[in-house]
Image (spheres, grey):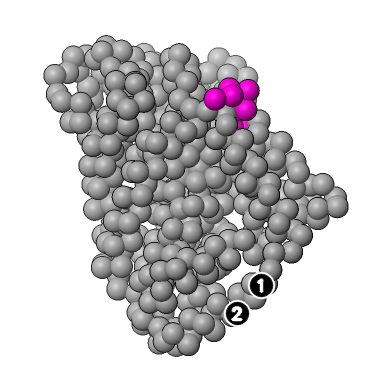
Amino acid sequence: MKRTQIIGTILAIAVLIAMFFVPESIGLSQAGIRTLGVLIALIIALVTEPLPIGITCMLGIALMVIFGVTPTVSEALSGYTNHILFFVLVSFGLSEAIAKVPLSKRLLVLLIRLFGAKTKRILLALMICAALMSSIMSNVATTAVLISVVISFLRVYDNKEEHQRSGKAFMIGLPIASMIGGMITPAGSPLNLLGIDFLADAGIRLSFVEWILIGAPVAAVALIFSWFIIARVFHPAEIAPGKINDYITSLNIPSRFDFREKYVTCVVAALLILWILSSWIPALNVTVVGTVGFAFFFIPKADILNWKEYTRSVSWASFFLIGTMMSMGNALSANGVSEWLVSILFSSKISLPVFLIVALICVIVFLLLIPIPIGPALISMLGGPFISLAEAWGYSPTLLIMPLVICAACCFLLPLDTVPLLTYATGYYKMTDMPKVSIPIQIIIVICVAVWVPIGLMILGYL
């Protein structure tokens, strides 16, 4: 075991032991204290990885039962019964189907030709490509699909220093763009669906188009600023136009769409149309529509996906992470931890202007992502109490839930979330490199959300 893994194991065990000595006088019941203890131990184990992430998540379910966090195994597995997990599986199938045809490469080349062959503009093209793909499929899957494209592009550099410096910019820009793109539509991230579910429980149906109206402008501004700050801080090296042309040629993109590419394009287009129509036809649930469309990739004559290829493409670590964290979120709510945390952070009355309220929510969410760098856990923990808090303040729950989801989805202060970990593992940048750009980007997101979300909600009639 590595040193960090040993330290993580010791710390996790120490937390599980120490939670029995914490008095109820802090404002939590014994069940609440044990729930918080198991969560902290689980996060330590996930960050330091003494065991694979999926195994740690499965063990987390067992710990919830062993320490009495939930009375039954069924309640400990409550997160795994959520439709969002089915959408996660569908999303990986969608990304694998797109990866089987030249569609993503074709989109990237189109953007390169549109923006120009300078390296900084190619970085912008890559980030826009990632954001657009991520708007309809998993952030993890989008990043995984495009990593190979980035690595092939970086081979055009002969100079080692230029190769490393440019790789740093591209490998940091890719996951950030994927996570920002995830806020554009409800289908862009399971976290969006989780937020929509909380609003549905409060009697509010936020439609597909309404989400786009709020999320897309924030994503557009955040993406352009992210590109600007990444290019300015890391200075990717310029390349001769001839090498850019050689790179485009090396992608071997056919001049015409073949049957398989046309088929995938038509299915994806149909999904987008049906998801948009779900704004007016409630029966067109995002997960249901996605599942039906996903099944079309397995039709034998289409020759797009088979079961073995699909199961290999799924990030089971992400599947178990989301399922376990939603289960933990349910336990945090049931045992009073969520209400306790919100009561510490917020007053039951507030007299600030609306944009400052939203800014405060954003800042607190980003700060909480430091000790809890896992979006599903944070949304599951705060979703219910935020709805109660919004009602106490006299506002629509959308005013708090939208900033919560948007900011929790941008978990890239450090490469600890699954998405940035994919590119961090390539070795192009250090843990300390990401905050150089992620902190300014998160500040811009706070400003954009604080300004636009209240305006968007007013336009939609929620405020």
Asked if residue 227 shows in the view, the reply is yes
- Occupied quadrant, residue 104: bottom right
| Secondary structure character of the magenta stretch overall | loop
The residue at the point 45 percent across, 25 percent down is 206
The answer to whether residue 284 is magenta is yes
* Mark 2: few/some/many CA within 10 Å (<14, 14-19, 20+): few
Q: Please indicate whether residue 313 sits to the left or right of residue 450 in the image.
A: right
The x and y percentages for residue 400 are 32, 26
Residue 37, picture quadrant: top left
Q: Are marks 1 and 2 in contact (CB under 8 Å)?
A: no
Q: Relative to 230, say whether 352 is above or below.
A: above
Task: Tell me: residue 370, above or below residue 37.
Answer: below
Spot occupied by residue 410 in the image (x, y as percentages of width and height)? 37, 45
Task: Tell me the CA gap for discs 1 and 2.
Answer: 13 Å
The answer to whether 323 is drawn above or below residue 141 in the figure is: above
Give the mark nearest the N terminus, 1 or 2: 2
Magenta highlight on residue 142: no
Please indicate whether residue 349 sits to the left or right of residue 92 in the image. left
Q: Is residue 38 visible?
A: no
Tag 1 residue: 255
Residue 256: quadrant of the picture: bottom right
Residue plotted at (39% across, 36% down): 213
Q: Could you say which is closer to the camera, residue 259 or residue 231? A: 259
Residue behind mark 2: 250
Q: Which is in the foreground here, disc 1 or disc 2? A: 1
Give the amino acid type for the residue marked by disc 1 in the picture.
Ser
Residue 69 locus on image (x, y percent): 49, 20
Residue 32: where, in percent of width, then height?
39, 18
Magenta range is 280-287
